Amino acid sequence: MSAEPAKRQKREEYKKSLAADESALPKKKFYRQRAHANPFSDHALEYPKTPADMDWVSLYPAYAAKTATEKENDTEFNESRAGDGKEQTKARGITKDVEIADIGCGFGGLLFALATKFPDTLSLGMEIRISVTEYVQEKIRALRAQNAENKTYQNIGCLRANTMKFLPNFFRKHQLRAIFLCFPDPHFKQRKHKARIVSTMLCSEYAYVLRPGGYVYTITDVRDLHEWMVGHFSGHGSFVGVEGRELEEGEVGQCVATMSTETEEGKKVERNKGEKFVAVFRRVEDPAWPGEG
Amino acid sequence: MTVPYQCLASCTRPAGDDFEWLLFGATGSQLVVQSSTGATSTWAPETPTPDVKEPARKDDDEGPPGKRVKLTPVAEPRPNFLHLRTAKDGKYLVAVTAEDKCIRVFQADAQCHLEQLSQRCMPKRPSSVALTPDGTTILVADKFGDVYSLPLLPSPVSEVAATPEPKEEQKKFAPSASVLTVHSGRNRKALEEQLKQAEKGPKQGKEAPKFKHDLILGHVSMLTDVACTTVGSRSYILTADRDEHIRLSRGIPQAHVIEGFCQGHEEFVSRLCFTNAGHLVSGGGDPDLYLWDWLNYRLLEKISLQQPILERYKGHPYQNAPTEFKVAVSGLWSVPTAEEEDDEILVACEGLPALVNYRFGSSSKSAKVIPLTGNVLDLAFIDVPEVGPTAVISIDHVHEPGSTSVVRTEPLASRLQYLSRQSGEWREDKTLSKALEGFSRAVQGDAGIDAECSSSKGDDKALRDMLYGVENLRKRPGAEE
C-alpha cells in the first residue's frame, strides 16, 4: 500500500520531465497497468455523442481540413450523417476518415507498424486502460517530432475508449475498412465470457462500422479463445471466414503478417516459442430485406 | 396497507365480444382484471417453493456472468409484477414478474377469469417486453443487454427442439490455454483452477431454460426498453440502453443486422414511444424529450420536459426535497386519436404527481402539466363510448406527491385517476370512476402481499424499489477509475 504514492509520484515526475523534451520516447515502465479492465462498469469515459461530434483534428492535426468553416461546424449534428462523404469530412474537421481500428491496441506495436505500412490510411488505436493509452499517445507525439521532416506517424492516433459499449459513437455505419482484435483478454472463466471482445452481439456492431468487403483480423495465443472467435464470427450472418491463398495475398496478407510480427504480444509469444492463432473474416453485404430479395 | 398499481394495461375487444374493454392492473404480486361489464377477478401466483424455482443458468457460453447462488433456501416472497402487455386484441396478457424473472402468459375467459397458460423463467431479470407487430412473438430485453424472442404460445414441438444440446460437455475438460500462453498471473491462476475443476469432473452447472428462446440481439449495457414496428413490409426492433443508445435493428429473422443508431441523448434512455404520425419519442435522464425521424436517424427536435415542470411547481414538486428536480422519464404514451397527423403524447416522470401533455402536430406545439393527486405510476387508455379515449392513471397513494420516499400520513382512498379530453383539455373524468370503484379501491382484507406488507421499514424500501427504479439508472460521477 505504501508503495502506491511513491509510484504515483515517480510517474508524475517522469511525465513532467518527458513533457520538456518533445522527441523523447516514453518508457513503458511508467505506464504499466493491470491487464484487465471491466467493460461493464461506467468508467469516467469521454466519448462523442455521435461520430459527427468527434474531434478528430486533435488526433490527426496534419489532416485538419483547411476549408472547415464555423458555418459548417454549426450545422445540426446529424445533418452531416445524411449528406454525402464530402460534407461529413468537413464537419468533423479532417480531410480523411479513419479506416482502420485497432481495438485493444495495448502499447501500440501494431499501430506504429500500420503507420508506415499504410501511410495513406488513418488508423486509430483504441484502448480501455488509461495509462497504456497515455503511453501510446506520448509515443506518437515523440515519433512525430522525430520524423517531422518526412511527416510520418501523422496518420495514427490513439484514444481511450470502451469499444464494447461505444464503438458506434466513434464510427459511422460502414466507415471502416479493417478492424484488428489482437491478443484480446481471453477471460478464461466461463463466468467472464460475456466480457470477451467477441460475441454474437458485438459481431453485429463490428458489422455495422465495417463496410461490406472490409475485414476483421484476429490473433491470439489461446486456442480456446481462437475457436471462440472463429465460432462467433463464422456463425454470424454478416461475416465469412477467409481461407487459403487469400490470407497471404494483397492487403489481407500484409495485415496478417504485420499483426503476427509487430504486436507486442506477438513478439512475446515468439520469444516464448508459443503458438499463434490467426483468423480473418470478411464483412459480407447485408441480406435483402425479407420479401424484397 | 395496500400496494398501488405498479402497472396497468388495457385492451379494446373486437365488436361482438363479451366485453368492450378489459383493464388489467398489477398490485404487488396480484393481478386484478375488470371488464366493461363490471366482471372482476384477481389472480395471484402460488408461493413458490425453492426447488420449484427455475435457477438462472450459468454455463451457457453466451450467458452473462452468473450470480452467486444463495446457499440456504429461504422462503421466497411472492414475485411482484414488473410489466403488463396485452396481445392480439387483448386475447392474451403477457406479464413479467421481477423476482423470479418469469414471463407469464394469461388468457381471460368470458367470466373475466385469468388463466395462466405458461410461465417461462428467463436467465436474467427482464427489463422490458414487447410483442412483434404480428402479435405472435414476445421480445424480452434484460438487464444484461440481451434481447430474446419467445413464441407467445409455446408449442409442444418447439419445446422438444429447444432442448439444449450438451455441446459444452467435452470442452469443460480441455484447458482453455497452454502453459505457454503469455498473459497475466491471474489468468495463470484461472488456468490452474480450470485444470483442478477438470480433474473433479464436470461441475453441476445451472440449467438453461428448457423452453424455446432465441438470443436475437444485444448491447453491452443494461437495456431499458424495447419496441417493434413495421414500415411497409419491413419490420424493425428498437432497443434503448443505459449508455444513451437507441439502436435500430431489423426485425426477426434478420435481427443481427444493425441499421443505425439514434444518437444524441446525454443521459440514460428509459422509454421509447411511437407517435400516431410514426415519429419516435424517447426520454430518460435528460431534461428534454427527443423527437426523431428514426428511419433516417435524424433528431427533429428536443422538447423540454424539465422546464414546464419547474415552472409549474416553482422548483421541485415536493416542497421539502433536498435536491433539485431531475427528470427521469418513467412513461411515454401516445394518445390514440382519429387523426393520424395529430401527434399527442402523455409523459410521466418518476416522482412527479402530474402528467405532461405534448402536442406536436403541424398546427400547434404545446406542453401542459396536468397535476394529479399523487405520483404517476402507469397509464392505460380505455375507449369510453361518448367520451372517447380515457386515460386510467395509477397513482401512488402511499407516498407524498412529488416524493419517492416520504410516506403520506393519510393514504388516498383511490389508486386510480381518470382523465379525458373535454373541449380540447385533459380534465378529470368521472364516467369510469363508478364502474372501476372496486378496481381502484385498495384490495382490502385480501391475503397475499397486502397482509404481508405491514409498514415496517424493510417493506417500505421494498415498495419504493418496486415503484421507483428509473432514477437509479443515472450514472454517478466519479464511479471509479
Image (cartoon, coloured by chain):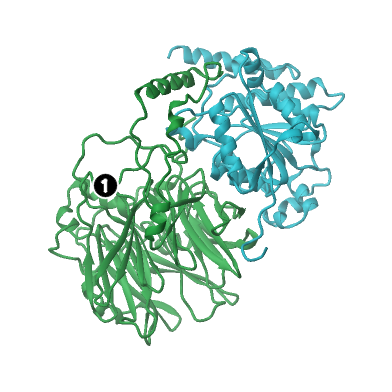
Chain colours: A cyan, B green
Circle count: 1
Mark 1 surroundings within 10 Å by alpha-carbon count, few (fewer than 14), some (14 through 19), many (20 or more): few
Dot 1 lies on which element?
A: loop
With respect to residue B160, does A292 lie above or below?
below
Query: Residue B206: horizontal and vertical position, in percent?
Result: 34, 39
Disc 1: which chain? B
Query: Residue B36: horizontal and vertical position, in percent?
Result: 29, 80
Residue B271 in sight in this render: no
Residue A284 in sight in this render: yes
Q: Residue furthest bottom?
A: B386
Q: Tell me the residue at 42%/37% (across/down).
A: B65
Query: Residue B5: horizontal and vertical position, in percent?
Result: 28, 63
Observer-nearest of B245 and B141: B141
Quarter of the image with the N terminus of chain B in it = bottom left
Q: Quadrant of residue B182?
A: top right
With respect to residue B68, does B154 lie above or below?
below
Query: Residue B37: horizontal and vertical position, in percent?
Result: 26, 82
Q: Amino acid at mark 1?
A: Lys
Observer-nearest of B149 and B90: B149
- A70 sits to left or right of B280: right
Q: Tell me the residue at 67%/25% (across/down).
A: A108
- B273 sits to left or right of B105: right
Observer-nearest of B264 and B35: B35
- B328 sits to left or right of B20: right
Q: Residue furthest right?
A: A149
- A287 sits to left or right of B155: right
Observer-nearest of A239 and A92: A239
Q: Tell me the residue at 29%/66% (across/down).
A: B25
Q: Which residue is mark 1?
A: B53
